[in-house]
Structures are given as C-alpha cells and as structure tokens.
Image: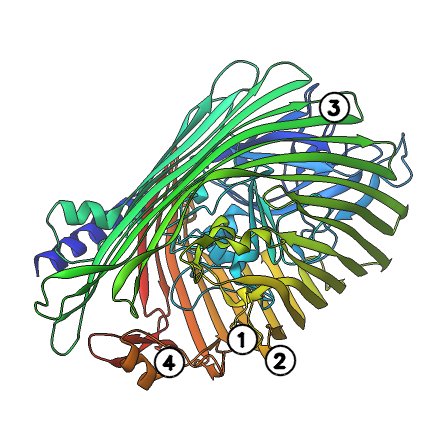
Amino acid sequence: MKIQNRFYFIFLVVFLLVSSPGYPQQITQNIKGQILDQDSKSPLIGATVVVLGSNPILGGVTDAHGFFKITGVPIGRVNLKVSYIGYEDRMIPNLLVNSSKELMLDITLEESFERLDEIVVTGQKDKSEVLNEMSLVSARAFSVEETKRFAGSFNDPARLASAFAGVANSPEGNNDIIVRGNSSKGILWRLEGVEIPNPNHFANDGATGGPINALSSNMLSDSDFMSGAFAPEYGNALSGVFDMKLKRGNYDRPEYTAGLSTLGIDLAAEGPLNSKGGSYIANYRYSSLDLIDRAGVVDFGGVPRYQDLTYNIYLPLNKRHFLSMFGLGGVSSISTVDEDDDTEENLTRNTFEASMGTVAFIHNFLVSGNSYLRSFVSLSRTTLESDSDLPTALNNDQFFNVFNDDFTRTYVRAGSTYGHKFNSRNKVEAGFIYNRIGYDMVQNAWNYERDQIENELSDDGSTERLQAFATWKFRVSEDMTMTSGAHFNGLTLNNSWSFEPRLAFRWDFTEGKALSFGGGLHSKMESPAVYLWRFEDENGSFTQPNKDLEMSKAAHIVLGYDQRLGPHTHFKSEIYYQHLYDSPVEDDPNSTYSLLNETEQYSPRRLVNDGTGRNYGVELTLERYLHKGFYYLTSASIFRSFYTAKDGIERETAYAGDYIFNFLGGKEFSIGQAEKNRVLFINARISLIGGSRYTPVNLQASREAGEEILQEDRPFSAKSDNLFFPNLAIGIRRNRPKSTHEFKIDVQNVTNNAAVVQEYYIQQTQEIEELPQLGTFPTISYTINF
C-alpha cells in the first residue's frame, strides 16, 4: 500500500509539472546547423534555409564555414527548404522545435547532374533516402525522434528497427536483430564510422543484442540501418548494419536533460568548448531498479544493475582540420536464484557480470574543395563473467558449480578513408581498417559422464583482421545512379581471406517511381571462442581444430521498387535472395548442427566450413511520414530460411518464422489553450510474427543423462506459437519559456499474450519447462529539457 501511495504521489507531481499555468507570450526557438556538399564534405557558402509557411518569412544563409542560424522560430512542427545554386533542393519535413533546446542540424546537398551556375535546381530529396549516398538498396534512415515516438521502442534503435520490413526482435525480450531469417550474430554495429562491440547491457559472448541498449537516445543523431547488399565500405557483416551517428553538442550555449523512468535515471549536458565551434555532449544513466533496491523501497531477487556513460567532443582546429573524440561504456550485472513454482525448492543459481567500452579519436582533413581524408584510431574492451550452479542432492540450499566462464577481449582499430569528387557525376572512396583483437578466455563446464567439471577453453593471445575497400559512385544520367566496388576482409589467425565485389544501381524512370538493384559478397569473423575451443584426443592431449575455420560468407541479391504516393506517403517493395556458404557445421557426416542457428554462447564442437544456407523473401512497406500530427508505417515480410549441415539434408533454420507483419501509427493533439503549448501524443504498434523453430527436448534421454538432451535427429522440427505483440504509448509534452517537459507511459504487450516460444529441461524436477514470450512490460518516464 505504501508503494502504491508513492506511485500516486509521483504521478500527481508530474501531472502538475506538465499542466501548470501557461504563459501568454508566443514561445520561439532557434534552428541552426551546417550544410555540406554530400560528396566532398566541404562547406557550402551562401546556401539558404527557409521555414516553409512562415509569415513573415524566416530563414538564414550559410557563412564561410557552412553554418546558418534562424532565430525566432515558433515552437512546434516545422518544414525546412534548403537551396543552393547548382544543387538539388532538399525538403526537411516535420522537425520538432522545442522551447528548451536549439534545434541543430547537419545537412548535406547533392550537386545537380548538370551543374547550373545561375539558377537554383528544383529537384527534391525524398525523406526515404539514407544518409550514406553509397547505399542504394535495403537501407533506411531513422531519426532519434522516431526512437522516442514509436510505441515499444523504449528509445532503443534496435527495437525501433524491428518495425522495418524483414526485421524482428527476440520474443523473450532481448533486442536481438533478426534480419531476413539470419542469426542476429551477423549484425555490424558502427558508431561515427567506427566498428564497436555490441553496445548492449547483459550481452553474452557472440551476441549482438541484449535487454537494454547502453547507448542513450539523448546522444544519437539521424542514422542508417541496412538489411542486405551492403555498400563496399561495410565489412564483417552478414545480416545487417547499424551505422549510427552521434549528436554534436550545442556550440553556443549550455543545455541540459534530466530523465527518470522505470528503466533508468538519465542525466545529459552539452555546451561550447571554444570560440571556433567546438562543443561537448555527454549522457550518464543508472538503473532505477538498482537504486530502488538499494534504498530498501522494494525487496526482490534478480535486480538488474547497470550504468553507462557516453560522450562526444568536437574540436575544429581551423578551416581544414577537425578533431573529434567519442566514448561509450557500460557495466551490468544480475544474480538470480530460480525456484520451482510449486515446491519453492531451488532449481538453479546464476550470476552474470559484463562490461563494454570504446574510446575513439577521429581526424577529418579537407584536403581540397573536392577531397577529404578521414582517419581514426579506437580502443575497445569487453568483459564477461558468469557462473551457473545447481543444488546438491543432499541439501537444496547448497550448490555446486556446473558452468563458469571469464572472457576478456580488447580491440585496437585504426583506419583511413580518402574521398574525392571529380565532378557532379563521379566520386570515389578508398580506405583501409586495421583490427587487432586480443583475447583472454576461460570456460569450464560439467562433464556428466565423468561427473566432474572440465575445462573447454583456456587461451590468451591476439590476432589481426585486415580490411580494405574501394567505391565508385557514377551518376549515369540525371535519373540513374550506380555504385560499384569491392571489400577485402582477411584474418591472420589462419590466413583466411575474402574478396567481395559489390554493385548497386537506382533508376528513377519516372517522376516519383524508381527501380533499384544490389548484389555482392559479404563475410564475417566468428567469435574468437569458436576458433579456440579445446578438444581432448584419445591420448589425452588437447588440440584446437577450429583454428583452421574460414570466415562465414554470403552472397546477397536485392531487387527493389519505390514509389512516392504524394508528398507525404511512400511505398517500397523488395525481393531478395541470399546464398550462405562456408558456414561452420559440425565435422560429423551424421550431424545436423550448423552455426547458422546460433546467436550466442556457442557449444564446443569440431567444426568445418562445409555448411550452406539460403534465405529468400518479399518485403512491402507503406509509410506516411508525420504530417499534420499523424503518421503510420505498415510493413509485411514473407520469407523462407533454410540451412544444410554436414549430413547434406536441407532444413528450416531456427529463424524460419515465414512471416512478419507490423502496423504502427500515431497522432499528436494540441490540448487546452494554445498559449499553454501542451501536446497529447498517442502511438500504437501491432506485430504479428510467425513462430520461430526449435529442437524438441528428448525427455527420456535427458532423465537418463542427468542433463538436457535434444532430439538432434529432428532439428528445429518444433515450431513455437505465433506471436501477437500490441504496444501502446501515451504521453504529454509541455513547452514552457525555457524548458520542455514530457511524461510518457509506454507499454509493450498490452494484452499480456503468453505464446510459448521455447522449451528446456529442468534437471531437478526432471520435467520440461515452457518459456513464454515477454509479458506486459510497462515503462513510465518523465523528462525535462532545459
């Protein structure tokens, strides 16, 4: 009852904050930013930016460094038009202007096919186009405002991406990215153009997702997500690419954000560093449940404890040299004791601790008006330590260890990219990336045949991965663009390498309609643990046969069609085929095991590159961009996913759900008197996802062996229930003269559906337990910007 009363008190305080008496004067804010040439990255001097529909007209002109500033813009949603002589106009719709913070934009313009020096070209950039102009297929840009707006996204870009065609998250609640029937381990994470480790809390070895993203949305700028046929600059990825950008801090004045939610406490600050446009921005977050538990307000087991810090520093040195430094770090831990629901006897005891961190230094050099050189060096480190214990047969309160691991990995990366724009039709990019991967890995597991715990992995050392790429963008005509190039990926651990040619084009064959094609080869290194497993021979010696494994590879082909259905609506369809090859499978002619079905914590097996797989499907997307306070996005994916192991039989993969349907939409309403500047927003999402597949448990064999034994002669023959996920978010946003307040309730799985998604064997009860999808999960948040 006390906790309930406290909740009502907090809700009342928040309501009063967002509903307090308004101010009669009109509240305005500034819009500012920088405009660059899309290809050469050089500033455009004299470009104009106008707020459409403003009376009198509000606008600005860029200075010698490409910066502009528009003052006195009324708060709310605005549309911008950006123009420059000889360049295509760009329309930027539905920007949200708040009273608390200046709106900062980084804008690029594309030179007209035939440069005209005395008139303004009237071509218009479509909102569906991505930031990376080399990505012509299977790519979508997303904004930080969308991560906050879409229901069930919890301000997490990974959860946001699951609304896109062909993408799904794990039904158990993780934000694993399952793209086009591929394992989530095929994802590449990049931040400011630098490869980073998995940026999620509570992430196991090899995983690319986790329950909570360590990168706060307060730090993100507009970014790209790719689902196939990647541009030549992207390497070490098989299924998808997150190419994320960080915000630049305000270079004129300090600004702050404070947020409190059931997930965490957020504190952010940004401001100027020097008079040359330098700035900083930083965000710190701490687990709310950890604080509540430590304060003694509630007392329950399994409290997730985590905290993270992100920062971005930008320092222009002069007109041609620019330095930046960013960092991302997080620590997380959880300790649980699982009990039998009926007898309350202990079943397992588990502890988990993980950390990740990256710091990077970037130097951008404008070599000339048409050339640039971008160089970086970064250092990353991840740690993982976990233990699993079972109760003894004599005393249920005493435990013995059956599994433990301690993994530490370090990454030193350095690279450079040179870009040169020859003219409005031709641009080239070439670069290299050096990766030094250090590892110190130990894993022990219980051997039920010998009735003792034994070492499976114990190795430390390092290896290198070398990458190089070259890209040529060629505008064949005003309506057709082609990109071509290749990527090289090499692993010195066993001297394996992959040469990957790639090609894509886009043809706008009539006004508002376009065809696109993309194809290429791709490869990815597995987790170091896969290469370093130890196996005991008959003579008692240990070998590491997996060190000879080559990288996993895939060939992607995509055909797409785009159509604008008016100024605010867009339809897109894509057909794709993926051939997976050199996939690691167990070196046994009767085995059905393939690494294609794994996402994390791989089991130690002797592997060879004899496996294959294939994915194919069709994707449809109909999207209305936010206009007059209303938006929707509908996506449909119908696909098949297969793999072939050493036994030569083709089977459906663990991710062969066959279909994914999403509908999401929302509406903003002005409420109360206009001068009070209050907006009510309602966002909803409904997802229908075909059930994934799993290998059923062999109950009799498990009881005899004393551990879980799967029916490996029937791999992935069991299909989980189909999933129904309804999500709903409701909130109020209030602008006061110097601050913006927002209160939001975001509920995932509103109807608490409990589809069975997996089964596993419980050793103590000797029974099979069913694992349901994530139940109703509400998040309540209050944020103030000032």
Secondary structure state at the residue bearing disc 4: loop
| Lower position in the chain sequence, tag 4 or tag 1 | 1
Quarter of the figure that contains the C terminus: top left
Along the line of sight, the residue nearer the viewer: 453 or 417: 453
Residue at x-position 72% and y-position 22% = 366
- Left or right of 507? Residue 651 is left
User: Closer to the observer: label 4 or label 1?
Assistant: 1
**Amino acid type indicated by mark 2:** Ile
In the rendered structure, the answer to whether residue 23 lies left or right of residue 423 reads left
Q: Kindly identify the residue that appears in the image at 57 percent across and 66 percent down.
A: 585
Residue furthest bottom in the image? 700
Disc 3 vs disc 4: which is toward the camera?
4
Q: Secondary structure at mark 3?
A: loop
Give the residue number, with chain letter if any, for mark 2.
649
Marks 1/3: CA–CA distance: 62 Å
Could you say whether the residue bearing mark 2 is in a helix, strand or loop?
loop
Provide the secondary structure element on which disc 1 rests. Answer: loop
Labelled pair 2, 4 in contact (Cβ < 8 Å): no
Left or right? Give the position of 372 relative to 104: right
Circle 1 sits on which residue?
592
Quadrant of the drawing holding the N terminus: bottom left
Q: Are marks 1 and 2 in contact (CB under 8 Å)?
A: yes
Residue at image mark 3? 45
From the image, tell me which residue sits under label 4.
697
**Rounded to the nearest whole Å, what is the CA distance between mark 4 and mark 1?**
15 Å
Q: Which of the two labelled residues, at mark 2 and mark 4, occupies the earlier sequence position?
A: 2
Can residue 43 be seen in this snapshot?
no
Residue at (17, 58) in percent of width and height: 301
Q: Amino acid at mark 3?
A: Ile
